[in-house]
Image (cartoon, rainbow, N blue to C red):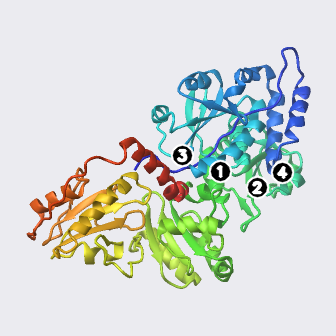
């Protein structure tokens, strides 16, 4: 299908650092803040940058003088531009490098660009390099690093590649990077200030902020995103968080329902990590690009997706949230707001659903299996559906477009719901093209395929048909590539169809049918085309560019 999708972000650095002589830490930070004050950053981003200041104060600034090696002409808005010529040198000569592999036509990459640049400027003083590679222009380099989706981000530490799995805002990027190069946990100085923050807070009460318990807590903090980690050994501060009985203690606070979660397990990183991961999410997560990873990339692999406008959601909200409580560690409950077209349109299209009414869909992110709910929204009904969803006692839902009202053309339109009626008709020899709207090869085939349909239109024993494989799913087989052209001979159609992998002209199809059709027919004379209209290279580029639109939602799912 070509390279597709788009999924995640990066960060870099910029500001003033040491001159050739001696610059104090205070001077360096002051110079940075002068530049930083002009940046369009949110309050949350500024809070994260405070961590950066603490980190810089603890380090010898001379370690970061290597950032001066970034030449101006290779820098775009704070982001270093890499190619096959300089990639290896940059990754090896800097301790921390975040690299984005992007495609110029990728809408996710375009949305990421300003956030990535903002993070690059804000992080420059830490010595982290944010860079980018045009994966289309430098395809061999992208292949060497296993790039299969856009954008793909990697964080290089001393030349070793690690995946970036953070968010796509500058705040997310800064926060993710700082956790991996600086203190992941802060010491609580003011409980009141912390309690005013909007982000989920994990606060630990320990005998000491150094030692085995602290190390376990810090290890989790370096891996878990979307949560601020803080610790204290002060009993009076701990008391303000409800941690007064014993050490070690841990509480997770958030502004949504179930505002307080108390940890009661063994104070080890695995147990702490599971606790934080399970409790940092709201009971019901509103779907957006920012929250997609919370929904689909958690340890919980089953999701219930409620498609509803806000007015309708309020009517069933209490039952939906109560059901979410009952299946908290087993199912992620999410809401897709049908009133927000920017969010809803692509995901409705992905699941081949309409926006005419409230829908509930069970989705298994690992396998892509779907289960459509068709009941009322009472608490008992929601719980019963959830139980069956977990047990696998439901019939999978398969996508299907609505059947066309008119289907009299020479090439018949097939959807999943009409597949059996049209394609499995035992009296017909059927050729079916399964295509994708963005597929360049499908578009190249279309003139010849239409010519075939027109040439055989009056032969009643033959059907030439096509089906959009991105909007229709078949239980009988899974389509792996586009176009896939299948031949279903008349008679017993229980066997697997023949694949026509090499035939791409009307004349070639007719020749094949003449030899393989079960019902004899008078074959028309169709000449082979003299030449191809498009080169293979141009078709592939068109295919890759077009596929991004179809896969924007897949990237989030």
Q: Is residue 127 above or below residue 404?
A: above
Label 3: state its secondary structure: loop
Pair 2/1: label in front: 1
> Residue 515 location, x and y as percent?
9, 59
Nearest the camera: 513 or 393? 513
Instruction: Kindly identify which numbered label has been placed on residue 390.
Output: none
Q: CA distance from mark 3 to mark 4?
A: 29 Å
Residue under pointer 2: 199
Query: Where does the image place residue 351, in percent across and percent down from the top left?
Result: 48, 68
Q: Nearer the viewer, mark 3 or mark 2?
A: 3
Find residue 446 and report its image quarter. bottom left
Residue occupied by mark 3: 150
Q: Secondary structure at mark 1?
A: helix
Q: CA distance from mark 2 to mark 1?
A: 23 Å
Residue occupied by mark 4: 43
Earlier in the chain: of badge 3 and badge 1, it is 1
* First of labels 3, 4 by sequence position: 4
Q: CA distance from mark 4 to mark 1?
A: 21 Å
């Amino acid at each position: 299908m070509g390279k597709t999708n788009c999924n995640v972000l990066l960060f870099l650095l910029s500001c003033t650092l040491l001159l050739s002589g001696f610059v104090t830490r205070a001077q360096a930070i002051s110079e940075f803040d002068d530049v930083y004050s002009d940046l369009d950053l949110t309050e949350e981003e500024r809070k994260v940058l405070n961590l950066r200041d603490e980190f810089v104060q603890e380090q010898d600034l001379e370690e970061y003088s290597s950032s001066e090696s970034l030449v101006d002409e290779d820098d775009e808005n704070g982001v270093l531009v890499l190619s096959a010529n300089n990639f290896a040198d940059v990754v090896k000569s800097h301790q921390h490098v975040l690299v984005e592999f992007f495609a110029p036509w990728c809408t996710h990459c375009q949305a990421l660009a300003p956030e990535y640049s903002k993070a690059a400027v804000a992080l420059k003083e830490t010595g982290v390099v944010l860079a980018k590679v045009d994966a289309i222009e430098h395809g061999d380099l992208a292949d060497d690093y296993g790039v299969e989706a856009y954008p793909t981000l990697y964080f290089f530490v001393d030349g070793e590649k690690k995946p970036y799995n953070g968010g796509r805002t500058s705040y997310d990027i800064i926060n993710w990077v700082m956790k991996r190069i600086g203190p992941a946990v802060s010491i609580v100085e003011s409980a009141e200030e912390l309690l005013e923050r909007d982000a989920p807070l994990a606060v630990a009460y320990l005998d000491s902020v150094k030692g085995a318990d602290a190390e376990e807590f810090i290890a989790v903090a370096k891996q878990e995103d979307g949560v601020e980690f803080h610790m204290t050994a002060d009993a009076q501060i701990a008391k303000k968080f409800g941690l007064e009985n014993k050490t070690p203690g841990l509480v997770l606070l958030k502004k949504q329902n179930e505002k307080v979660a108390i940890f009661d397990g063994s104070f080890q990183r695995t147990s702490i990590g599971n606790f934080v991961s399970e409790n940092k999410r709201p009971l019901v997560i509103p779907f957006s690009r920012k929250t997609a990873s919370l929904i689909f990339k958690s340890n919980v692999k089953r999701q219930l997706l409620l498609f509803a406008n806000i007015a309708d959601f309020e009517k069933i909200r209490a039952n939906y949230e109560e059901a979410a409580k009952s299946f908290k560690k087993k199912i992620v409950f999410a809401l897709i707001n049908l009133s927000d077209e920017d969010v809803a349109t692509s995901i409705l299209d992905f699941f081949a659903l309409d926006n005419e009414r409230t829908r509930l869909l069970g989705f298994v992110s690992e396998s892509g299996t779907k289960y459509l709910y068709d009941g009322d929204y009472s608490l008992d009904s929601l719980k019963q559906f959830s139980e069956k969803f977990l047990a696998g006692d439901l019939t999978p839902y398969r996508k299907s477009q609505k059947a066309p009202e008119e289907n009299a053309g020479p090439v018949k339109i097939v959807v999943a719901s009409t597949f059996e009626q049209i394609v499995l008709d035992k009296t017909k020899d059927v050729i079916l093209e399964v295509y994708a709207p963005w597929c360049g090869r499908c578009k190249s085939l279309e003139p010849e395929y239409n010519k075939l349909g027109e040439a055989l239109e009056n032969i009643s024993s033959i059907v030439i048909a096509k089906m959009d494989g991105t909007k229709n799913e078949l239980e009988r087989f899974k389509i792996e590539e586009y176009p896939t052209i299948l031949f279903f001979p008349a008679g017993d159609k229980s066997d697997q169809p023949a694949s026509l992998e090499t035939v791409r002209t009307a004349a070639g199809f007719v020749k094949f049918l003449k030899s393989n059709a079960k019902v004899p027919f008078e074959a028309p004379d169709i000449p082979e085309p003299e030449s191809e209209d498009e080169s293979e290279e141009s078709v592939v580029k068109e295919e890759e560019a077009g596929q991004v639109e179809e896969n924007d939602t897949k990237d989030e799912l």
